[in-house]
Image (cartoon, rainbow, N blue to C red):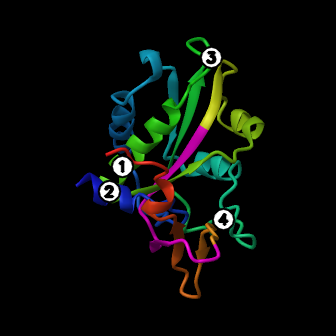
Amino acid sequence: MIAELIKQNRSCRRFVQDHPVAPETLRELLDLARCSASAANRQPLKYITSTNPEKNEAIFDCLGWAAYLKNWPGPAPGERPAAYIIITGDTRIATNYWCDHGIASQSILLGAREMGLAGCIFGAINNPKLKKACAIPDELEILLVLAIGKPAETILLEQVGPDGDIKYWRDDQEVHHVPKRTLEEIIVSSYE
């Protein structure tokens, strides 16, 4: 059911690194993105995938992993993703990608959850370093990076507390807590 997949689709930051993600699995996920909506049907997104351990390490080193977890540099060896998808925009097709990369990312990650995998969307990217590490042509603008793998952490959704703090956090058992605003707080008006 889609509602359950959406609730399970949290930003996973620790994975079972030695659980492989097949290149064909990434192709299946990219086919979901390919079939997703695109502004003016321009379809300017292009993808770079990696399941190669050495290339994965190079991509890992280009990403900012968790801004709210100040003393955590990212997953330790053994907890890193088995695959990555780099989402780029082809400047020969468009220079404004609207929300295409967000729609594509959601489609990919919902598909991953359905397969028992999880992921994390990265916008905190060292673009020059990643362009060099993956030999990304100049006409492709890096938009997002998705980490994909078998999840190795428990993530709980909970209501934002009375202090209004929306920062995610980890407890002593390493459970990742994600505060969410209530439905009543986010609906501004309802004309019925």
Q: Nearer the viewer, residue 2 or 166?
A: 166
Residue occupying image coordinates x 74% and y 43%: 126
Q: Which residues are magenta?
A: 144-163
**Circle 3 Cα neighbour tier, 10 Å, few/some/many (<14 / 14–19 / ≥20):** some
Residue that carries the numbered disc 1 in the rendered image: 110
Mark 2 or mark 1, which has the lower sequence index? 2
Residue that carries the numbered disc 3 in the rendered image: 91
**Circle 2 Cα neighbour tier, 10 Å, few/some/many (<14 / 14–19 / ≥20):** some
Q: Nearer the viewer, residue 23 or 91?
A: 91
Position of 174 with respect to 133 (left or right) is left
Q: CA distance from mark 4 to mark 3?
A: 31 Å
Q: Quadrant of residue 75?
A: bottom right
Can residue 115 be spotted in the picture?
Answer: no
The tag on residue 31 is none
For the residues bearing labels 2 and 1, Cβ distance under 8 angstroms: yes
**Circle 1 Cα neighbour tier, 10 Å, few/some/many (<14 / 14–19 / ≥20):** many
Q: CA distance from mark 2 to mark 4?
A: 25 Å
Position of 122 with respect to 120 (left or right) is right
